[in-house]
Structures are given as structure tokens and as C-alpha cells.
Amino acid sequence: MISLLVITLLSVSSWNEPFWGPWSVTERYPFIATDAETHKETPADEKREQRFPSLTAPFIWAIRFFQIFVTNADGPRCMMYPTCSQYGYLAFKKHGPIIGLFMTADRLMRDNISVEEFYPIIPIYGTFRFYDPVENNDFWWTSLP
Amino acid sequence: MDFPALICLLLFFTSSPSNYSEEKQLLSFADHLFNEGDYYRAITEYERFLFNFPENIDAPRARIKIGLAYQRGQKWRQAEEELDAVIRDYKGSPYERQAAWELGETYYKSGQFPRAASQYKIFQESFPGESFAYKAQMRISWCSVRTGDYKTARKELGLVESSSPYYEPAQGFLKDLAGLDTLNRKSPALSGAMSAVIPGTGQFYAGRYMDGMAALIINAAFIYGAVEAYNKKIYGAFGILLFFETGWYGGNIFSAITSAHKYNRVQKENYLNTLEKKYWEP
């Protein structure tokens, strides 16, 4: 009984460890893991000082509302990663309300049938999506952090 | 001769004696996995070899191979740690030289170009006169090219001595680098201005036709809606549509400018990849 408890506790504690398992970069061997964790928001992004936080907040709330209630109701439909709502969230957090709004609108217009031509495909959420992070679109904007 | 003795004799002569000792077999299996590109399993086998035969003469080679397997498997941090440890543990040996080179390669392949350049410089200082020291000078130039610092790249290529086996390639590379200035480019300012006048045209100019079409239709629909709402004095709807149109219109200009920058980036990357095929020596 005690050993069972110890094993259970150990396995629970290992859930929080970073992913490390079989991996491969060649097609011949099973493609077991492209680590989705690497595409997540990093602590540096979290700590980034926001521009005009009070003006940005309503946009962030609207996006969060959309993600929690609307997406859960109508299901995920975005072809890209990060999803358009998550992209908007990251853009608002990084660049504030004005550029954040423009970048989000830009992304929504780019989420069309031409994605295959311009974006790399990555395996994520058990499916494949077109990879288009915020950094792919503000790279030329060198004066902003 | 009785029958059992004959069997024993037959078995003795027919069984092929193993050419490999256990450690050789372990190492050759690990090498086989490595050569097959199965890096994850190769690392396990090299680790097994090191666990069983830590004092073996091939132990440093196995450790370098672990570092290389991490590097080929794009596990950059682990590759750096492993190669760094080899450099520390085998100072003054040929393994130090190999690990130092591969550490530079790891930095380069992971896109850490300034770190790669300084590692190649360390390599040159530590192992002067070697063929790889000459090669390091070419790599340093590549680091500058990849960071977009073409001026430094030209300077570094100019430092390749005439006695170096890389002198001719360096001269060719220097000449071809000038081609970067003559690439077909799109003007981000023009692209943005075009989309400011007629939404979507800047994206067309930058070769993103579907994006341009989406921008044109969405902006036209919202402008039409806002004008209609204003004409019919439905000011609430007018305000809402105007707010959304502001986003679409700004996004359309942003998209046009970014599309031109992306076009230029692709042109540059393609040209650099052509140069890499021509002048990069693995």
C-alpha cells in the first residue's frame, strides 16, 4: 500500500517536469515528439512590460472571453499556430493596443487558403497547423522590444 | 573417431569466432544508430558503452559522439554541455580540438552566430596553422553574413591569407556577396502607401494575392456598411463598424508593409542559401 502511494506520488511529481522522451528529427524513425512546450509563451514574454496596460486590458479581456466561451462552444477552426486569438493576445501584450489591433486584424486577413504557400507546417494539438508566431511579423520593427 | 568428438570438432571449425570484443560491438552498434540518424537511441548506446567501459580508450570519442548526436538531433543546450565537458576533460588532446570545433558548429547551427564566431576565433587561437583554423576563418565570415553584417563579412573574407586553401573560395564568395545589393526587392513604403490608397493592392504588389483579396473585400464591406449606417442615421451601428474598420484598415497597411519585408527576406535567404551551397564546406 505504501509502495503504491510512493509510486503514485512520484509519477504525479514527474508531470511537472519538462518533456524529455524519445525524439527524432529524421523521417525514417518515428516522429514522436515535436515539443509543443517550446512554442508556448516563455517566462520572458510574461515578464515583458506592457505598453499602455489600461488601454490594452479591454482587448485582452475580449480575447480571453472569446477563447473561454466562444471557442469552447464552436470549436477550434484556426489553421495557424498560435491560433488567431492567441496571436492577438500575444500581439496586444507585446505591442499595446494600436499595433496589437493592427497585427490581429492582419493575422485574421492572412488566415486564408494561401497559408500552405507561406508558412511551415508543424504538428501540434494532435493535428498539423501553419506556424506563424508574432516574431514572424514584427521582425522588421526593430525599434520596438 | 567417435561421433561426439566429430560433432565437437565440426562445431569448433564451423563456428566463426567473433572479430569484435564486447566494447567494440557496443560502440559499433552505437555508431550504426548514429549513422542511421537514430540519434536518441544512439545516445543511449554510447551511454551504455561509457557506463560499462568508462576507462576505455574510445570513451572520449563516445562522449563527442553523444554531443554530436544531441547536435544533429537539434538538442542544442545538451550538445553544448556535452562538448564543453569534453573540452574541459581532455585538454591538450585531439579530442579537445574536435570538441572545440563541434561546439562552434553547434552554436552556428542553432543560430547563435555571435557565439559561434567567438568560438571559431578561440579555435583559431588554440590550434593555429591547422587546416580547420583556415576553415574557421570562412565560418567567421559566414557568421557575419548570417547576422546581416556584410561589411564585417567582407572584412573577414579579406583576412583569408593567400596561402590558405580557402583563398580562392573566399575571393569568389567576396565577389558573389555583392549580388545581395542587386536582388529584386519590394519597397515596404510603396507597398504600405498602395494599400493606404486602395486596400489590398500593397499585398498584390508583394506577391500575396489572397491576402490582398481578403483585405480588399473586408475593407470594402466595412466601409460600405459604415457609410450606409451613417446615411441611414443609425449612429450606433456606424460607430461599431467604424471601430472595426479602423482595425481592418490599419491591419491592411501593416500587412502590406510586412508582406514587402517578408518578400525581401525570402529573396535574401534564397540568395544566401545559393551561396551556402556554393561556398559552405561541411
Image (cartoon, coloured by chain):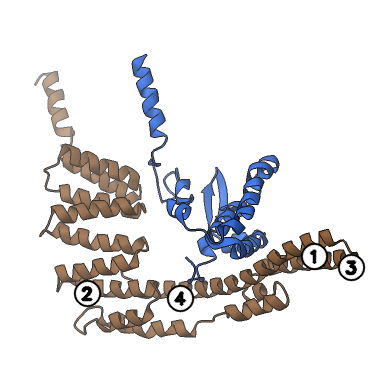
Chain colours: A blue, B brown
Identified by mark 4, the residue type is Tyr
Amino acid type, residue under disc 2 in the picture: Tyr
Q: Position of residue B5 (x, y in %)?
A: 11, 22
Mark 2 near mark 4, Cβ–Cβ under 8 Å?
A: no
For the residues marked 4 and 1, what is the alpha-carbon distance in whole angstroms? 40 Å
Q: Is residue B130 left or right of residue A13?
A: left
Q: Give amino acid for label 1.
A: Ala
Is there one chain holding both mark 4 and mark 3?
yes
Q: Which subunit holds the residue at mark 1?
A: B
**Distance Cα–Cα, label 1 vs label 2:** 62 Å
Q: Is residue B18 visible?
A: no
**Front in this rendered view, residue A57 or A78:** A57
Corner quadrant of residue B84: bottom left
Q: Which residue is mark 4?
A: B271
Mark 2 → mark 4, Cα distance in angstroms: 24 Å
Asked if disc 1 and disc 2 are in contact, CB closer than 8 Å, the reply is: no
Mark in front: 1 vs 2: 1
Mark 3 Cα within 10 Å, few/some/many (few <14, many 20+)?
few
- What residue sits right under mark 3 in the picture? B231
Asked whether, in this view, residue B197 is left or right of residue A23, the answer is: right
